[in-house]
Image (cartoon, helix red, strand yellow):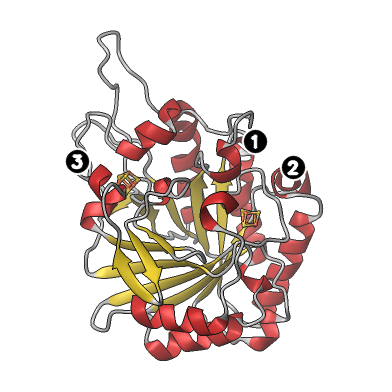
Amino acid sequence: MTPKTVAFRKDARNVFFHILTRCNFRCRHCYINPREHGTKTLPVSTVETWLRVLHKPGKASNLILIGGEPTLHQDLPRMIRCARRLGYASITVDTNGTFCHGILDKTSPDDLDYFSVGLDGSSAEVNDRIRGKNAFKRAVSGMEKAIKKGFRLSLIYTVSRMNIFDLKNMPNLLTALGINRFFIQVVGIRGRSAQVGAPSLQVTRRQWASVVPRVARRAAGLGIQVTYPKVFLKPGERFECAGLVADNYFVFPNGRVYRCPLCEDFPLHSLAFNKDKLEPRPPVNESQLFQLTISEGCVMNKLVQPGNLDYDTRGRPRYQVACCLLKEEIHPQKT
Ligand code: SF4
Ligand code: SF4
């Protein structure tokens, strides 16, 4: 059961569309940054127009509708139907599990491929310290309702210093809930966790390597498909920047469109919606940073989360940090 690194693909597009930045939770690691992303809720007509612009016929475009909490948008069901009509190859809604505005009754498993629910602990004790009071209970009861209605679910766990010890308990929880897709993320130093004075949530390379692949293998053994970021490259592995070799769009309600999530705390977006037209922005922006070659691997990692790096006594990096979008995948294997 060896994890397979999923190569970047130019022939597939991934559109991460933040339809609002508002949320009914206040997670400690929330990456939303109102200074850079605004506080606007996009009208459904604008979302539909931008969905049209972002869809390229002939290329498989995967859409992830995200927020803030996207189910707080009353018109989410209409957006999902519009994306289906336009021919998006897959449609996922990333949610905190509160499933607001009766979304489970207003959309159908035929229109939506997945709800992807964020949960950061196998118990209220662990999860609610990160995601807030009653977050665990609300998400679990929401997931149970969604499953009863026939929706497909995946679960996203953001690994930080606050919950890495509990990751091992997640495969059993997924099995109990009947969820067979598991995304493990690593906490990024963005948004709230990048604020001055915020406690460091980053895990070390050693902690990551000793816990995550092992739990992922165990989950796969229980019949769960697992995806997690590579984070650290092994000697001899080739570094590639998704900004140059893949086709990802991170769209915000203030019109900013980034190609790299690590740039989202800065006005470095390479594209922007201007009167509903998607236009390139003049330099300097993230595109110029993608071109830089450094021995540490990812340039943005070195700039925004250098705590991930380590150097030998001669000042040479001990390893390269992979693109944050490079994933390892393990397919389910029933024992
Ligand atoms: S649920 Fe998502 S958007 Fe809301 S606070 Fe948590 S991380 Fe931020
Ligand atoms: S995370 Fe680093 S390697 Fe990946 S797109 Fe951004 S700058 Fe490029």
Kindly report the distance in space between the C-alpha atoms of the residues bearing marks 3 and 2. Answer: 38 Å
Q: Quadrant of residue 7?
A: bottom left
In this rendering, does residue 33 appear at all?
Answer: no
- What residue does disc 2 label? 129
Residue 110 locus on image (x, y percent): 52, 88
Residue occupying the point 38% across, 26% down: 309
Q: Quick one: label 1 or label 2, which is nearer the N terminus?
A: 2
In this rendering, does residue 196 appear at all?
Answer: yes
Q: Quick one: label 3 or label 2, which is nearer the N terminus?
A: 2
Contact between labelled residues 2 and 1, with CB atoms less than 8 Å apart: yes
Residue 198 locus on image (x, y percent): 63, 32
Residue occupying the point 81% across, 55% down: 134
Residue occupying the point 38% across, 40% down: 231
- In the image, farthest residue toward the bottom: 85
Disc 1 residue type?
Met
- What residue does disc 1 label? 162
Is disc 1 placed on a helix, strand or loop?
Answer: loop
Foreground of the two, 316 or 113: 316
Q: Is mark 3 within 8 Å of ligand 2?
A: no
Foreground of the two, 101 or 34: 34
